[in-house]
Amino acid sequence: MVPLSQLEGCQKELNVALSKYLKVLEKSFNTDISKAYRNVDFEASTVNNIIANHFYRQGLFDLGDSFVHECGESDETYLKLPFQEMYGILEAMKARNLEPALTWAANNRDKLLQNSSMLELKLHSLQFVEILTRGSRDNALQYARTHLVPFASMHKAEIQKLMACLIWADRLEQSPYAEFVSSTHWDKLAEELIHQFCSLLGQSSDSPLSVAVSAGFQGLPTLLKLTTVMAAKKQEWQTMKQLPVPIDIGPEFQYHSVFVCPVLREQSSDENPPMLMPCGHAVSKQSIMKLSKSSSRPFKCPYCPSEAVASQCKQLHF
Amino acid sequence: LISSAGLFLFSSKSTSPPPLSPLFLGVSHNRARERKKKKKMEMAIDTPSPSPSVSPAPSAAAGRQTRAAESVRLEHQLVRVPLEALRATARTNHRLAEKEIAAVLSSASSAAAAPGESGSAAAVDHLTSLVSRLHGLKRKMEEGARAEELQVQRCRARLDRLAAASAGDDAEWEDIRLKRILVDYMLRMSYYDTATKLAETSGIQDLVDIDVFLDAKRVIDSLRNKEIAPALAWCAENKSRLKKSKSKLEFLLRLQEFVELVKAKNFLQAISYARKYLAPWGSTHMKELQRVTATLVFRSSTNCAQYKVLFEQNQWDSLVDQFKQEFYKLYGMTLEPLLNIYLQAGLTALKTPFCFEGNCPKEDPLSLDGFRKLAEPLPFSKQHHSKLVCHITKELMDTENPPLVLPNGYVYSTKALDEMAKKNGGKIICPRTGEECNYTELVKAYIS
């Protein structure tokens, strides 16, 4: 029965190799990353809503529609229409057509100015350069007279630069103003448009789902270590109200000022706000009350030799 | 005649190994690839130890490497699932080959044992049919080898993806990672169309396991259709591993079938079914067995709550859930969607009491209702050191950009206030209260 035993031999070798591979995997990877997962009701419809909005935000409209159809959450308000408008403008920009962008910027002129954004001027500048590079100096001048003049008083330097471009009309790439024809300039402007568009919409520039999940990518390893340590100490992870250790994620995720009193090592709150001492150091209100024992006796700053009285301390607002 | 038949038998026997040897080669190729795979994976996991240098640049790169290594360590599911799929395919191929070859050989040897009975022509026909059967087996084994090869390639693609974690474009790697976990979420929730679309448009078909989930879909759909057979077949295929993990899925399926018989009032059939299929589980799950068999007495029209629930429609839904859990476990997947796991971790890291106050900046996901709702049962994050963010520029206020305090107690960064003073001839207007003061009245705060 040679064929059978040959076959069996090969099969055994393959199985051995596969089990070895499996063992290496189990050793090299964390086999259970759901240890830090809290068994709470992570409602599917909320998550689905978030995902649908994410797709629309990223301009993946077909995907968003397909998703909404499949998950059956069709009666929620989605950000579809405004983002379709935005991507329409961006598509046109990619094809070097600035009309939709200019229309939008003009319609939202006041709000853009409130945000101190020079977007409208930048769009007009780029349009001016486009007309210039397409050959017609006269048309460009005409355009400048119509559209750039309103900005002249506020942004003299910019206008001067653009006027100088007229001299270099057919050789802008070799001029000191080559940046106006570079594609990175267009990309940056598109980015600023996205930023302003979202801001006017009351939305963040980045998809909140991307942000939250990125924070999770960075924070999960620490959380898993924490749950392992807590399990070893038999402490209760599922019901804890605050983490005992900080989770280090990048500075881009810091949206709020957090003041930690250097004396009491506690986070400040409305009831215990940060206070500035005359020497320039800051501690929490409770620390000051403890240090001064009564409100008119001077106390020494924990950081430097200077003394202060509680009434001299000012509440800080970050 | 007999000797010529015997010769024929020997010659056909000698032709049987060659059709199989290319397959052996194929299998040994697989083994060589498996070894290469292992080496590659070890390289992907190993972090090059950071060089003990003083300058900051290498340590930033080393920090990046450790972060990448930590990210890679979390991706067990990514590499484990194709391995399990490969094992399952290999198992099926082996079983098929063993069965066929054993059948052919026993048939051949029985023909050799009784040669004279039906004459040499019949013997030749018999052997020819065996040879064509072996050819058929060869084709099937070649197909099987191709399927295994594809799965090995998928394993390699996963390892390549992990190796790329520390090299090159971080933002792109993370973007793909988000897409991968979105596909995982959609597959688990049975949104197969959108999952496939996303995988195709992002070109990540090799990094997701759509086919594995589609296999499970067949069982899930059948269960929703109140058919037990495909689920039982799945249990039979994976019998040894389910037994190792002490799974009671098969038991629950049998119980449901029993209850359906009781519902249909086939009491005698139900009893004989219980005797055959439920009794073996009595030693380990007696209480449950007793409870369900009691439905014989209570019947489907009962109002007794304990037993009424067993006749409910959603028993089938809980069977689907139970199947999903066993399925995930078998393939080394997490029981919860990856998206939920990472989202919970992220929300915990982002959650501060300040997020729920009035002026939460729009850039913080926790300014949105949906995220707030999800974060509600999660713990707050903690910080040991002050981290201050300028209200105007949203940048960190640290020693390079220290905080300055206005007379009214409001604090902004040096960068922001310098620029404001420059534009307003030394005048400072607090953006939040409107109060004015002079740049010279600002006081530096020393906060670490």
Image: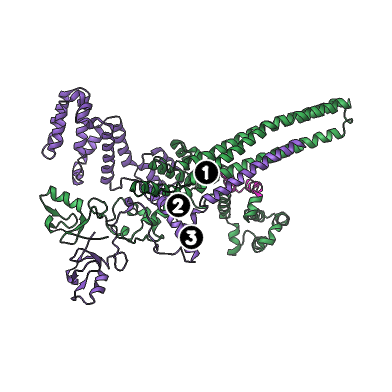
Question: Judging from the image, what secondary structure is the residue with disc 2 in?
Answer: helix
Label 2 amino acid? Asn
Task: Establish if A177 lies above or below A266.
Answer: above
Q: Residue at x 86, y 25 (%)?
A: B4
Residue B272 quadrant: bottom right
Q: Residue at x 17, y 71 (%)?
A: A311
Residue A75 visible: no
Residues shaded magenta? B216-239
- Colour assigned to chain B in the rendering is green
Residue of label 3: A228
Question: Which of the labelled discs sits on residue A23, or is there none?
Answer: none
Question: Judging from the image, what secondary structure is the residue with disc 1 in?
Answer: helix
**Chain label for disc 2:** B
Q: Are marks 1 and 3 on the same chain?
A: no
In three-dimensional space, the C-alpha distance between marks 1 and 3, rounded to whole angstroms, equals: 26 Å
- Mark 2 is surrounded, within 10 Å at the Cα level, by few (under 14), some (14 to 19) or many (20 or more) other residues, namely many
Label 3 amino acid? Thr
Residue B432 placement (x, y as % from top left): 19, 56
Residue of label 1: B41
Residue B37 placement (x, y as % from top left): 55, 40
Q: Is residue B236 magenta?
A: yes
Q: Nearer the viewer, residue A254 or B167?
A: B167
Q: Is residue B363 magenta?
A: no
Question: Which of the labelled discs sits on residue B340, or is there none?
Answer: 2
**Chain label for disc 1:** B
Q: Magenta region, mostly helix, strand or loop?
A: helix
**Chain label for disc 3:** A
Asked whether disc 3 touches disc 2, contact meaning CB atoms under 8 Å apart, the reply is no
Residue B116 placement (x, y as % from top left): 89, 30
Q: Nearer the viewer, residue B52 or B237?
A: B52
- Colour assigned to chain A in the rendering is purple
Q: Residue at x 28, y 48 (%)?
A: A202
